[in-house]
Image (tube, grey):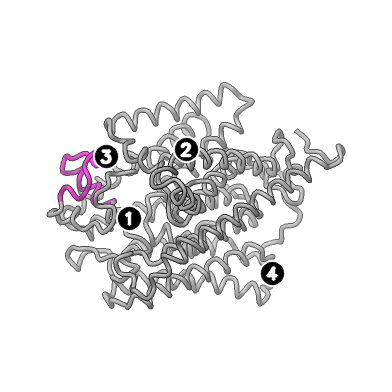
Amino acid sequence: MTRDTSVVDERRSPAGGTPRGLDVAALGAVGLSVAITVLIGLLGPSAMVPRLPGPSWQPPYSLDVHPGAHLVIAMGAVAIVLGGLGLAAALRSRWAPDPRWLLAAGCAVAGLLAFLPPSGSADHLNYAAYGRLATLGQDPYAIAPATLPGDPVTGAVEEWAGVTSVYGPVATAVQALASFVGGDSVRLTVFAMAVVNAAAFIGTALLLHRFARGDADLQRRAALLWAANPLMIYHLAAGMHVDTLAIACMVAALTVRGAASGLLLGVGIGVKLNAGLVALGPAWELRRSPGRLAVVAGTATATVVAIYAVAGPHVLDQVSAASRKVSLATPWQLVKVGFQSVFGPGAYSAWIQIGSLLLMACLAWLVLRALGTPGVPGALGTPGTPGTPPADTAPAVAAAMVVAWLFAAPYALPWYDGLVFALLAMASWPALEAFMVARVVVLSLGYLPAREALRPDDLLWTKTLLRETVVPWTLLALTVVLAWWAARAGGRARRRPASEAPRP
């Protein structure tokens, strides 16, 4: 898919200009948030940074200061809040700094973070363990890390030690390659994965910049939404989640055509199954070209089938189990508690699954109605008119579908939102950008600290009050506002006079 550069939104400001005080404050908040994220990793093992067993001369490196839990948790909270406020203000700013500087700064930080220990979660220890199992000839989809507790790599897992891999075969292949490089060293294994993660993050940034070529304002927004986005740097560059690799594949798929697009879509789904929602974007864009659609869909399907077939019969076992889980910070946690109080344990699963699917379908329909795409009922005008995204329907439709999934999913973690930010960097949809910034900030605050076992007793309220109560209710309110906004926007378009209706 290629971007139509023939249309320019007249509201956009030219690059350069004199920054106002608010503009400086916004970029200052973004910069400070990123600096705090870097500092968390630089300080070494803490409640936010898991220890990496292995020779100290091996990368990644840190100062091993061992800062207190209260300090690093506060640093994480400040980084998240400052990052969210700064990003929201920067996206609304009319000052347009050279996007190449934002791009370069974000890529430099991502490269630097590859040499620092990951922070924000302990998932990378699971990645290393699954790769280790694969290199030892075991099936990570059938054997959990806890099966080999004496192993120097699988024994380092802090959470989910008894759970088999939920990640796709492509992710497992990368983890196995990292394990081959790292051997018995968790530290070196994690560093090998961090290099791949940084390459995927930087590659995505470069692809987004190239996609928006010819429009400096779109390039600036793309840099703010991805390369210089402090929230994505916090979760995907510093947190080193496998989602980064899936996102890189999906962004690449939206920048090419034909079989190459289908192949990349298939590889992305081979990293994480839920990335497959992005395929609905190209499917929508190619719906009037059956031949081209058949090529893309056929190639993607064949790639996915081949990848998952090679992985063996247990590859989807944990995916199936995970689909029935409810994370503590989603609104469905409130529903789960309500069902359990009335019907007892275990009575909620099927009803929540059905409810989440219905909610996703409803949100997808409402958001698509608000999408400025010819052919969508109630579309908000045509590209180039105020309030509508540009002419690239594939990223915009994909973004709408992924947003609907994220807001409706019973199980969601803040780094899942990275996929939407990358898609919005291609679609330029300010209203949805605002919703996503608010969502990821709220959800991120609910998942502090990274290491549950090291949370001080006097901060238990961050789990019992914040994660289990405040965040779910806040996200529920945000979901209601999203539905109201989408319904209102779609309704305005339907009431628009025929003379202002979107042209095909």
Secondary structure of the residue carrying numbered label 4: loop
Q: CA distance from mark 4 to mark 2?
A: 41 Å
Q: Earlier in the sequence, mark 1 or mark 3?
A: 1
**Residue with the mark numbered 1:** 123
Q: CA distance from mark 2 to mark 1?
A: 22 Å
Q: What quarter of the picture does the N terminus occupy?
A: top right
Q: Residue at x 42, y 45 (%)?
A: 246
- Crowding around mark 4 (Cα neighbors within 10 Å: few <14, some 14 to 19, many 20+) is few
Amino acid marked by disc 1: Asp
> Looking at the image, which residue sits at the far front?
342
Q: Earlier in the sequence, mark 4 or mark 1?
A: 4
Q: Residue at x 78, y 46 (%)?
A: 492
The stretch drawn in magenta includes residue 34: no
Q: Are marks 4 and 1 in contact (CB under 8 Å)?
A: no
**Residue with the mark numbered 4:** 17
Q: Earlier in the sequence, mark 3 or mark 2?
A: 3
Q: Is residue 452 visible?
A: yes
Q: Please tell me whether residue 223 is drawn above or below residue 164 in the rendered image.
A: below
**Residue with the mark numbered 2:** 276
**Residue with the mark numbered 3:** 141
Q: Please tell me whether residue 472 is drawn above or below residue 462 in the rendered image.
A: above
Q: Which residues are magenta?
A: 127-148
Amino acid marked by disc 2: Gly
Residue 126 percent across, percent down from the top left: 28, 52
Say which of 10 and 471 sits in front: 471
Say which of 132 and 154 sits in front: 154
Q: Quadrant of residue 400?
A: top right
> Looking at the image, which residue sits at the far top?
291
Say which of 66 and 460 sits in front: 460
Residue 273 percent across, percent down from the top left: 41, 39
Q: Are marks 4 and 2 in contact (CB under 8 Å)?
A: no
Q: Is residue 223 visible?
A: no
